[in-house]
Image (cartoon, helix red, strand yellow):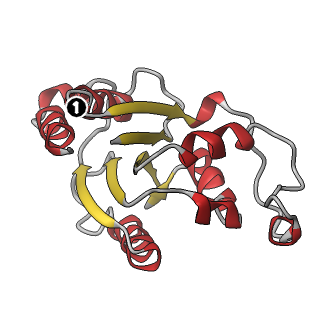
Amino acid sequence: MNIAILLGSPRKDGNTAKLVEAFKNGASKNNNVEIIAVSDYNVGACKGCNFCFQSNENLCVQNDDMQQIYAKLKKADMLVIASPVYFYSINSQLKTIIDRLHNPIRDSFNIKHLALLVVGASSSIPDLFAAIEKQYELCLNFFHLNDAGRILVRGMKTKDAILETDALNKAFELGESIK
C-alpha cells in the first residue's frame, strides 16, 4: 500500500514529527510511506472561487505548490492526518492543505483508508480532541473511507514530552498493522 502522511507541524523534531516517524517506521515494513511536511510547501488558502470545478483538468486558479501535493495524494491508497492541536483544532498549515482538497481532483484519488495522529498540550480538558475527531468522522463517512486508526496524545507541553509516554510504541504498532 502507498501511504501519504500529511504532517502539519512546522517543528521538524517536535512531538508530532516524532509520532509520525514512529508510525512510518512501523508502516514501512509492509508499505511505501511518504511524509509530506506541509510547512515545506508554499500553498495559499482556498479562495472559494470554484474555478477548479469549471476547469477541465480541475486546475486551481492558484499556481502554487499544492499541485505537487495533489500528485503525491493521487498515488496514495491511505492518508494519515498528523497535527499538533492548536485551540481545539488541527493547525493552520494543515488546514490550508485540507481546504484545498475541496477541489474535485480528489475524486481521482485512490485513497481508501484514513488514520489520525494528533498531539495536544492539555491533559485536563476532556474534549480536547472532540472537534478534530468529529471532522475526521465526517470525512470518513462522506468519502466512504476505512478508519485505519487514531492516536490521540495529551499532555505534550514540552519538546520531547512524547518520549515519556507509550505513544511512540502505539504509533509504531499502528503503522506495523497496516498491510
For the N terminus, the image quarter is: top left
Residue 115: percent from left, percent from top: 32, 54
Q: Can residue 122 be seen in this view?
A: yes
Q: Quick check: 39 above or below 150?
A: above
Q: Quick check: 167 above or below 49?
A: above
Q: Mark 1 points at which residue?
A: 162
* Picture residue at 37% right of the left edge, 32% below the top: 33
How many circles with numbers are drawn on the protein? 1
Q: Is residue 134 left or right of residue 23?
A: right
Q: Quick check: 160 above or below 100?
A: above
Give neighbour class at mark 1: few <14, some 14-19, many 20+ (Cα, 10 Å).
Answer: many
The kind of secondary structure element at disc 1 is helix
For the C terminus, the image quarter is: top left
Residue 140: percent from left, percent from top: 38, 71
Q: In this view, does 81 lie to the left or right of 96?
A: left
Q: Quadrant of residue 108?
A: bottom right
Q: In this view, does 64 lie to the left or right of 17?
A: right
Q: In which quarter of the image is residue 137?
A: bottom left
Residue 106: percent from left, percent from top: 61, 61
Of residues 97 and 88, the one drawn nearer to the viewer in this rendering: 97
Q: In which quarter of the image is residue 159?
A: top left
Q: Can residue 87 be seen in this view?
A: no
Q: Tell me the amino acid under the disc marked 1.
A: Ile
In the displayed image of the protein, which residue is found farthest to the top? 13
